[in-house]
Image (tube, helix red, strand yellow):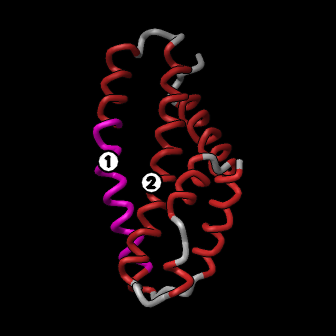
Amino acid sequence: MKNWKKGREEQRKFYGVKLGSKQSIISTLASLFLSFLVFLPLAMVLYQFVFIYGYERQLVYVFIVLVWISLQGFNALMNYWAVRFAKVLDKNNEALQSIEEKHVIIYQFLNPGFAFASLAFILFIAYQLGAFS
């Protein structure tokens, strides 16, 4: 819990840092691309999992949990990389350099707001696709 609170403070410090629009866009796009590359193999495995075991109704819940955890991990890794890339792009910014990104990844993985929103979205999509009928 101590790391989660520290991560929340570090994330707030990152949001308070003044970055140039070019640096912000570059760090966001680079972190999105790198996180996508890391999670692409997992997404492909989950996709195959649906085609192999999709007829088993009990495994729908396991699949939903795996997608949810993967989405949490993707969000955490993307925020981690965004802080890392911003620190590389702006080495003279003291406030930015003082942020510890290892706490940001813990906070973002356990972020309750994103967790509930993403779970609601996943359940809505699963319901629309007929997973609960």
The amino acid sitting under disc 2 is Leu
The residue indicated by pointer 2 is 77
Disc 2 crowd, CA 10 A, few/some/many (<14, 14-19, 20+): many
Q: Is residue 86 positioned above or below 112 on the image?
A: below
- Left/right of residue 54 with respect to residue 104 in the rendered view: left
| In front of the other: 36 or 60 | 36
Q: Is residue 91 positioned above or below 57 on the image?
A: below
| In front of the other: 128 or 54 | 54
Q: Is residue 69 positioned above or below 30 on the image?
A: above
Magenta highlight range: 24-42
Residue 86: x, y in percent? 42, 76
The residue indicated by pointer 1 is 38
- Residue under the image location 37 percent in, 29 percent down: 46
Query: How would you classify the magenta stretch by its main secondary structure?
Result: helix
The amino acid sitting under disc 1 is Val
| In front of the other: 129 or 1 | 1
Q: Are marks 1 and 2 in contact (CB under 8 Å)?
A: yes
Q: How many marks?
A: 2
